[in-house]
Amino acid sequence: MPRPADLSILPWLSAAAFAAGCGMRLLDPLLPMVAGDFGTTVGAASTVIAAFALAYGAGQVVVGPVGDRQGKLRVVWLALLLYGLCTAACALAWSLGAMVALRVLTGAVAGAIIPVSIAWIGDNVPYQDRQAMLGRFLTGMVLAQLLAGPVSGVVGEHFGWRASFLVLGVMALVVALALALRLGGALWRKPERAEGGGGVAGYYAILRRRTGRRLLAAAFIDGFCLFGGAFPFIGAYLIERFHLSAAEAGFVVAGFGIGAFAYTRLARWLIGRFGERGLILIGGVALFGLLGAMAVAPVWWLVAGLQVPAGLAFFAFHGVLQTRATEALPEARATAVSAFAMALFFGQSLGSLGFGLVIGLAGYGAGLGLAALVVLALAIWTQRVLFARPAG
């Protein structure tokens, strides 16, 4: 049973997730400016995005065990502090190579903020209430998905791309200061007894368990067909097939974030009404229908209308898997959540390559249709083999 804790710190953790989430999307509208400043192409400048993502995923090997051994809130605070400093330092980059190096450092420390916070929630919230609480926590990340691109674009247009990094860095440092004040003396005290089962042994323990292997496989496929497969290509689909501008496509895709935000408000009711098994199947079937409809949509506004329910369905589906990850290794929860994040990241990386190839050969409709079929199969499989019995 999780230990009772003061959950009033949750808004500050959500603010930390907002800062980390902004770092993932900050560069989307700034790449042409960065490329022009460094005298290179947009394609070459995109390495700064890949550098952040690769470091974020690879760093999970370290951050989970460190969180288990050193105290989760202490690790979240330190990661947020370093993240703010590294993000602000990006504004001083003198070359593309320096920018890539700074983004590697930023991604590595950012990778500790959201997974270790999720693990702390798993430690302190009973399982039956956990998905609703995670929904509240994820409000910060969802808002980052909605706001980071447009805001950084406006700031960059008026003050230059470096100003966007400086603003985000300062914001992260302010949240880190507020979190430190909220934690008080507890911030400096290492847990009397570190949680066991972490490190390489913790990852091995997850892989030895059949449910652990199945959960990581589900995370990998989720990342492959959705995080890296369908959703990143919808903006390009709108531009190339329906001839929308980049700004118009951006506003359309923002509807996905609205649906995701709706999930954060409805999570408690949804899980109470349908349960995990029902919710993951409903989310999967809904995504199957929505992605299939996008694949054959004859007009752009139909794709636009499907974005809000797609965001709601995706987070309902993904939220169940994420909640179950908090029980994959209760004795080393941060290690377990980091393993889940790592599987999701590697699936996303390969999915972007695989679906890029499919789309290049057969078109966007084929890519979206393939994602629809895979997520339907995944939902049926996970309901049958992963959620046959309630966790906790």
Image: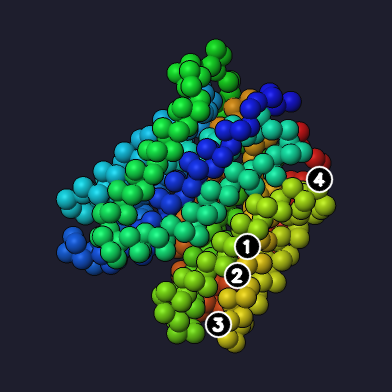
The residue that label 1 is drawn on is 259
Instruction: Pinpoint residue 359: horizontal percent, then vertical percent.
Output: 49, 74
Marks 4 and 2 in Cβ contact (< 8 Å): no
The crowd level at tag 2 (other Cα within 10 Å; few <14, some 14-19, many 20+) is many
Dot 4 or dot 3: first in sequence order is 3
Between the residue at mark 1 and the residue at mark 4, the CA separation in whole angstroms equals: 28 Å
Mark 3 or 1: in front is 1
Instruction: Pinpoint residue 370: horizontal percent, then vertical percent.
Output: 60, 70
Marks 3 and 2 in Cβ contact (< 8 Å): no
Between the residue at mark 2 and the residue at mark 1, the CA separation in whole angstroms equals: 7 Å
Relative to 326, is 77 on the left or the right? left
When the figure is inspected, residue 362 is found, relative to residue 207, above or below; the finding is below
Marks 4 and 3 in Cβ contact (< 8 Å): no
Kindly state the secondary structure of the residue where label 4 is placed: loop
Mark 4 or 3: in front is 3
The residue that label 4 is drawn on is 388
Amino acid at circle 3: Trp
Residue positioned 46% across, 37% down in the render:
112
Dot 4 or dot 2: first in sequence order is 2
Q: Of the numbered discs in the image, which one, if any, rests on residue 300?
A: 3
Dot 3 or dot 1: first in sequence order is 1
Q: Of the numbered discs in the image, which one, if any, rests on residue 354?
A: none
Q: Of the numbered discs in the image, which one, if any, rests on residue 307?
A: 2
Dot 3 or dot 2: first in sequence order is 3
Amino acid at circle 1: Gly
| Front in this rendered view, residue 211 or 311 | 311
Residue positioned 25% across, 49% down in the render:
91
Between the residue at mark 3 and the residue at mark 1, the CA separation in whole angstroms equals: 18 Å
Marks 3 and 1 in Cβ contact (< 8 Å): no
Instruction: Pinpoint residue 387: horizontal percent, then vertical percent.
Output: 77, 46
Q: Quadrant of the N terminus?
A: top right
Dot 2 or dot 1: first in sequence order is 1
